[in-house]
């Protein structure tokens, strides 16, 4: 190793020096053609500084990003929230949770590095009724980001009659604009409501700043409080038709005015005041930014646009749809009515049952653009039982709430719930396996009589036990047994 220091020039990666502390010496790589030099340093420099990667401003300092990106959504938290509604399928929950968290992490990086990081798109593989679509539905409620769920079978290749895949991004932008508008209204809600209240007072009793009745301020304040509380929403007042001034119309002349409730007037005035607060151009710019950086597209039934080589493909444009999806997922620019949208940072999640095909039947290029694969397992009777009992809005709770509207107290024994789960699994095995959707069939069959003749059971308590379940689904089981003999 050369100890000469002629022409020493430190090579840096992201402005951090390659350093190695060996016996209080620092080896620094230099541009000296003779090799390396040994120099001493009072302290060891870190391999990479945090500031070399991270943006100077925190995520919370950017309101546009923070609006669509909740920094508190850790992967564990996302998986826990999904578990409140979906039983099992932990691999799928982890993949989705990590993908969503990586969106937040990328926002914290400097622009140069963050532009190089692309989302790891996901392909979920599993039979019908195991939770693929439900994961997407619940994920949409968790993330405050533009989200759209589409069916792959709804699209055709460019040149065929029907919708092409570019309409996915167009619809996603529409959702983003509406979400950004709602967020803006929410952040300025009090300001808008105060202005609307003052305008309603002015229409009701005149200008509140008038000095004609200086001793009536308490009346103005009383009316203002009632308007804010919504106590006057059902009252009616006269408003001018479009193109007429409220100050010039004759109260007795109904040809240039109409009488409506204050509730309806408030909605119109809220819209007018909202338009004054934010410009359309600024709103669209923020919405496109949110779509490009935080948008999520869930493509369901992707297996329906592929088939194995020996099968006849009736849909002539199915493979063409796959080809059209390639640039969309890889990253392209889509022209929408709001402007151009770059799709390279949008997260795509595709799912399919792949009953009559397999993932390898997809175009190889499309498989490469969906690098994260998650396999969802079939549901057994224990899973079906958990679906009926563990989720916050499980089907048993839903049915009890529905019957309670008819003044009927519906009670299920634990054994009856297990019987419903076992029968559903049995039918899935002997007939077509439709997963958790079979529970709907069995439960509706059990409650059919009580639901139809609800007037006869009003005010009563109905106890559903194992015997009741067995009796109600007897016909369904007989049809199931005959199914295996049909050619």
Image (spheres, grey):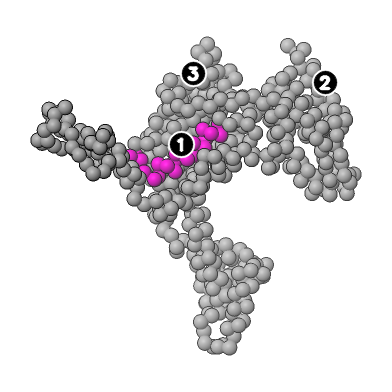
* Label whose residue precedes the other's in the sequence (2 or 3): 3
| Quadrant in which the N terminus is drawn | top left
Disc 1, SS: strand
Separation of marks 2 and 3 at Cα, in angstroms: 39 Å
The question of residue 223 being in magenta is answered with no
Query: Label 3: which residue?
Result: 360
* Label whose residue precedes the other's in the sequence (3 or 1): 1
Disc 3, SS: helix
Query: Magenta residues?
Result: 92-115
Percent across and percent down for residue 107 are 40, 45
Percent across and percent down for residue 234 are 67, 67
Query: Label 2: which residue?
Result: 478
The question of residue 106 being in magenta is answered with yes
Q: Nearer the viewer, residue 314 or 366?
A: 366
Separation of marks 3 and 1 at Cα, in angstroms: 21 Å
Query: Label 1: which residue?
Result: 347
What residue is rendered at 67% in x and 69% in y? 231
């Amino acid at each position: 190793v050369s100890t000469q220091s002629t022409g020493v020039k430190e090579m840096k990666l992201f402005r951090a020096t390659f350093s190695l502390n060996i016996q209080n010496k620092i080896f620094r790589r230099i541009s000296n053609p003779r090799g390396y030099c040994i120099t001493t340093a009072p302290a060891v420099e870190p391999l990479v500084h945090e500031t070399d990667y991270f943006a100077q401003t925190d995520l919370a300092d950017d309101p546009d990003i923070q609006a669509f990106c909740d920094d508190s959504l850790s992967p564990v938290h996302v998986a826990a929230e999904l578990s409140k509604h979906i039983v099992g399928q932990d691999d799928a929950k982890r993949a989705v949770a990590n993908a969503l968290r990586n969106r937040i992490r990328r926002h914290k990086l400097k622009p140069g590095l963050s532009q190089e990081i692309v989302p790891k798109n996901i392909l979920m593989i599993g039979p019908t009724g195991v939770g693929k679509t439900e994961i997407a539905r619940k994920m949409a409620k968790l993330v405050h980001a533009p989200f759209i769920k589409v069916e792959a079978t709804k699209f055709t290749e460019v040149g065929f009659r029907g919708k092409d895949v570019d309409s996915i991004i167009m619809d996603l932008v529409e959702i983003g604009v509406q979400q950004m508008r709602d967020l803006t209204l929410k952040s300025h809600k009090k300001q808008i409501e105060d202005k609307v209240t003052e305008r309603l007072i002015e229409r009701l009793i005149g200008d509140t700043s008038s000095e004609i009745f200086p001793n009536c301020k308490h009346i103005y304040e009383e009316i203002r409080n009632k308007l804010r509380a919504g106590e006057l929403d059902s009252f009616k007042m006269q408003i001018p038709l479009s193109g007429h001034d409220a100050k010039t119309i004759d109260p007795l002349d109904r040809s240039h005015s109409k009488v409506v409730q204050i509730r309806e007037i408030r909605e119109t005035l809220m819209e007018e005041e909202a338009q004054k607060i934010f410009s359309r151009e600024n709103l669209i710019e923020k919405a496109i930014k949110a779509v490009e950086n935080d948008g999520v597209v869930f493509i369901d039934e992707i297996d329906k646009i592929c088939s194995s080589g020996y099968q006849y493909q009736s849909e002539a444009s199915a493979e063409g749809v796959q080809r059209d999806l390639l640039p969309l997922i890889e990253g392209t620019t889509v022209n929408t009515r709001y402007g151009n949208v770059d799709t390279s940072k949008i997260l795509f999640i595709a799912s399919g049952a792949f009953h009559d095909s397999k993932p390898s039947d997809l175009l190889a290029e499309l498989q490469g653009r969906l690098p994260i694969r998650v396999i969802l397992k079939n549901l057994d009777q224990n899973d079906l039982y958990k679906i009926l009992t563990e989720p916050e809005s499980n089907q048993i709770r839903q049915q009890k709430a529905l019957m309670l509207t008819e003044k009927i107290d519906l009670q299920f024994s634990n054994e009856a719930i297990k019987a419903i789960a076992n029968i559903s699994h049995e039918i899935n095995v002997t007939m077509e396996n439709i997963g958790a959707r079979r529970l709907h069939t069995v439960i509706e069959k059990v409650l059919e009589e009580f639901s139809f003749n609800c007037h006869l059971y009003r005010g009563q308590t109905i106890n559903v036990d194992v015997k009741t379940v067995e009796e109600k689904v007897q016909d369904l089981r007989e049809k199931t047994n005959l199914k295996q003999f049909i050619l």
